[in-house]
């Protein structure tokens, strides 16, 4: 049985290239030095973000796969309208840590993750007690608040964790097919009045 790819890391990067939040998922969350390793990977992807956002023909916020780190990890990117960058590191070996055979990840598999993450970030911005300007590097340096401007909202962190834990390639398509079949049954299936 082959492994199902999973999310290894989710990163929110501010418009000043400052990390706003980094979540690491199993099995990487238990490895010593994994936070530093994924911080380096996200930092290395910033140049590719910059190149992709310069493309004037870009229609979508989805930047696709930014880079394949090795046979196991790949980094996917998304940029919000406000310049905040979202990066998702996909582990092709999954939570089991075994090499995957025949399973690939496409852009359409990762796009629902980015939409959900952007929705979580928008909900965070709608909180009147959250001020995004406090998370700029110059502000945190001058007022000494926070841990280098990282997001600390428990509700936001829980939502990011839920999104990362629940993602599987092809999950949205399976849900769409299920909903379509249910709607077809609701329209065409008539219960037997004799039953």
Image (cartoon, rainbow, N blue to C red):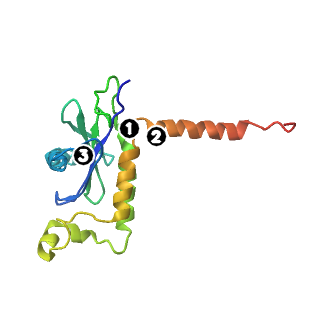
In the image, residue 39 sits, relative to residue 72, either above or below, namely below
Viewport quadrant of the N terminus? top left
Asked whether disc 3 touches disc 1, contact meaning CB atoms under 8 Å apart, the reply is: no
Viewer-closest of 73 and 79: 73
Viewer-closest of 191 and 2: 2
In the image, residue 94 sits, relative to residue 77, either above or below, namely above
Asked whether disc 1 touches disc 2, contact meaning CB atoms under 8 Å apart, the reply is: yes
Dot 2: element: helix
The spot of residue 34 in percent (x, y) is 18, 46
Task: Tell me which numbered mark, 1 or 2, is placed earlier along the sequence.
Answer: 1
Viewer-closest of 151 and 117: 151
Q: Judge the density around disc 1: few (<14), some (14-19), many (≥20) Cα neighbours within 10 Å.
A: some
Asked whether disc 2 touches disc 3, contact meaning CB atoms under 8 Å apart, the reply is: no
Q: Which residue is mark 1?
A: 109
Viewer-closest of 93 and 123: 93
Q: Which residue is mark 2?
A: 172
- Spatial CA span between label 1 and label 2: 8 Å
Name the residue located 87 percent from the left edge and 36 percent from the top edge: 194
Name the residue located 32 percent from the left edge and 23 percent from the top edge: 101
Q: Which residue is mark 3?
A: 30
Q: Is residue 47 left or right of residue 124?
A: left
């Amino acid at each position: 049985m082959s492994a199902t790819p999973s999310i290894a890391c989710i990163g929110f990067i501010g418009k000043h290239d400052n990390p706003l939040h980094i979540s690491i998922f199993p099995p990487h969350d238990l490895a010593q030095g994994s936070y530093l390793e994924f911080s380096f990977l996200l930092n290395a992807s910033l140049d590719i973000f910059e190149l992709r956002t310069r493309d004037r023909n870009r229609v979508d916020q989805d930047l696709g796969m930014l880079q394949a780190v090795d046979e196991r990890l790949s980094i996917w990117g998304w940029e919000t309208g406000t310049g905040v960058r979202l990066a998702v590191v996909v582990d092709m070996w999954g939570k089991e840590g075994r090499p995957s055979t025949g399973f690939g990840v496409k852009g359409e598999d990762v796009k629902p993750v980015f939409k959900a993450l952007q929705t979580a970030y928008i909900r965070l911005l709608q909180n009147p007690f959250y001020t995004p300007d406090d998370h700029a590097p110059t502000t945190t340096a001058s007022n000494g608040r926070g841990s280098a401007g990282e997001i600390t909202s428990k509700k936001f962190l829980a939502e990011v964790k839920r999104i990362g834990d629940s993602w599987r390639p092809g999950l949205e398509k399976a849900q769409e097919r299920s909903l379509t079949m249910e709607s077809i049954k609701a329209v065409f299936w008539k219960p037997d009045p004799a039953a």
